[in-house]
Image: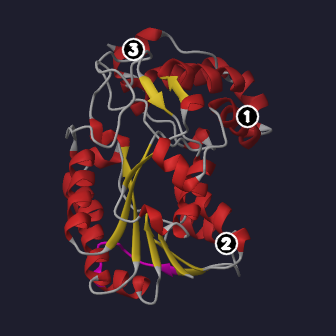
Amino acid sequence: MNILITGAFGNVGTSLLRELLPRGRHHVRCFDVKSPRTERVARRYAGQIEVQWGDIRNAGDVRRAVEGRDVVIHLIAIIPPKSDLDHAVTRAVNVGGTQNILDALAGSSTRLIYSSSLALFGATQHMPPPRTVSDPIQLTDVYTETKAECERLIKASGVTYALLRFGAVLPIDVLGVIDPLMFDVPLGDRMEFVHTYDIGLALANAIDTPAIDGKTLLVGGGKRCQIYQREVILKPFEALGIGMLPESAFGHAPYHLDWLDTTESQRLLCYQRYTFDDYVRDVVQAVGWRRAFIRVLRPLIRRRLLAMSPYYKA
């Protein structure tokens, strides 16, 4: 089967490649924007994939990428906090890029698997969990506005589609991606974690599961991954030797996270394997020898982290 993965060299894309390539029965075309980072990642898969560099905002680039594909897995999106920096660019990439894919797929039998988000439910901590597909959408920022618009466009397009709303997918190599966003989530908020490798498996299985077509599925880690933000900070930071940060560093306004009803997605895609403790183990392994330096530099690292928090500084 001929597969296109947009955003193939990001967190979720590389997890999908990890699951998909060993199966050996697909021709995989990877579409991404060219940069030193994406070129470095692409070299890991030399000889196993076809690489097409381009801009999702360019209709010509997208048409060439989509040509001859049986399934398109669309992962490209600008996500928080970067999505808040330039609303026009966020809309051009998230909505305009998705429209370019839909235009390129018009009249074809190609299936589209679209990565959406649990953020569409808005702040629901005051409601009993879990969230279900039938819960209403609440638009809270430009990111959720664009995701909701993309879902609407896809449903109205006539393309064969499946919408997968992901839970909280955290990268394993955390040292390069820590940002102030983590301080916006109150420590007591519920969060449905899903291991990036499980997301990769869900997407790989989705390729061979036409029973998901026309559905909106919630893809999370399941009951064993229904945790609280306190655990998300405490467990990896303690394991790395940084230690828990003070509560005063975290906000109190409910964030757009919650637990999910993943019964149907698990029944169809059979992907839930890992717990948050497994993720912490993988984080420590990825950090490797750098962990010794983290312990030595612990006071400096903690000061730099706390300087990122608008609540602690206030």
Of badges 1 and 3, the one in the foreground is 1
Q: Is residue 210 visible?
A: yes
Q: Position of residue 119 (x, y in %)?
A: 33, 40
Looking at the image, tell me whether mark 1 or mark 3 is earlier in sequence order.
1
Q: Please say if 73 is above or below 151.
A: below
Q: Please say if 314 is above or below 241.
A: above
Foreground residue among 158 and 94 = 158
Residue with the mark numbered 1: 281
Q: Position of residue 135 (x, y in %)?
A: 26, 37
Judging from the image, what secondary structure is the residue with disc 2 in? Answer: helix
Looking at the image, tell me whether mark 2 or mark 1 is earlier in sequence order.
2
Q: Position of residue 292 (x, y in %)?
A: 79, 29
Tags 1 and 3 in contact by the CB under 8 Å rule?
no
Residue with the mark numbered 2: 43
Foreground residue among 249 and 50 = 50
Residue with the mark numbered 3: 312
Task: Identify residue type, mark 3.
Answer: Tyr
